[in-house]
Amino acid sequence: MTHRILILGGTTEARQLAGKLAPRRDLDVTLSLAGRTQDPVAQPVPVRTGGFGGAEGLAAYLRDQEITLLVDATHPYAARISANAALAARQSGVPALRLHRPAWEPSPGDRWQMVDGAEDAVRALGAAARRIFLALGRQEIAPFETAPAHFFLIRSVDPVAPPLAVPDAAYILGRGPFGEAEELDLLERWRIDTIVCKNSGGTATYAKLAAARRLGIDVLMFRRPDTPDMPSAGSVEEALAMIDHRLTSTNRGE
């Protein structure tokens, strides 16, 4: 029996999971990407690009494509997609699991302040001019236009267009993972005193926080959104074990 698995991706873990599953002859794996990145990295399985039309559209896709298992391996802050995935799984009767990285935890010397999103971060920055590294996605930086007193350094995979409407900003292109030495050089070269970022978890973007700790730099970190109730794995290996258990149960008719 061939099982059809749909992975909602866009993360390193989604690509790694797909790569682990790709060689298996008992599986037909599709990776779904939102299509926001202009030049996504190569994927080890067939890719579906674009939205589904909300939870109902995803549920219809799961039924029409006879999907055996849905894996939500989207970014921890893709709250709407995760909510739609949980609802679509219930509507379609397709089993689902979530692969989400554990959140980062502060270490001695970290200068973290948790905030409830971009608007809250703008308020926390205050009026005094700062030199800020905005380690956020292109779609999330617009609220910082209300804080023109600061300098902003913005790093993104694709160019930011239009640029942020502030008098002092710089843009660099880059795709992680980034090493700690690389991040130290970046922060020192641009004289950064504050980082604004999400608690993304994982290793690909943690180096900036280790560098900030060494330099005594303030970090404004977005709190994670709540996630729907769904069986969850914190690593690719754990997800593989859960997938095998689920498929074995399906084969037995449990």
Image (cartoon, helix red, strand yellow):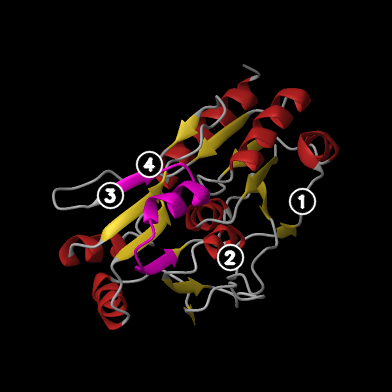
**Residue at label 2?**
138
Secondary structure category for the residue under label 3: strand
Q: What residue type is labelled 2?
A: Arg
Q: Do the residues labelled 2 and 1 touch (CB within 8 Å)?
A: no
Q: Report whether 67 appears left or right of 215.
A: right
Q: Distance between the residues labelled 2 and 3?
A: 22 Å
Vertical order, 86 against 211 (above or below): above
Q: What residue type is labelled 3?
A: Trp
**Residue at label 4?**
102
Q: Where is residue 242 in the image (x, y as percent from the top left)?
A: 49, 33
Please name whichever residue, 55 or 70, is drawn nearer the observer in this view of the structure: 55
Please name whichever residue, 253 or 171, is drawn nearer the observer in this view of the structure: 171
What number of labels is visible? 4
Q: Distance between the residues labelled 3 and 1?
A: 35 Å
Magenta residue span: 113-134
Mark 3 is surrounded, within 10 Å at the Cα level, by few (under 14), some (14 to 19) or many (20 or more) other residues, namely many
Q: How far apart are marks 2 and 4 (CA)?
A: 24 Å
> Which badge, 4 or 1, comes first in the chain's sequence?
1
Which circle marks residue 112 in the picture?
3
Mark 1 is surrounded, within 10 Å at the Cα level, by few (under 14), some (14 to 19) or many (20 or more) other residues, namely few
Q: Position of residue 172 (x, y in %)?
A: 48, 81
Which circle marks residue 51 in the picture?
1
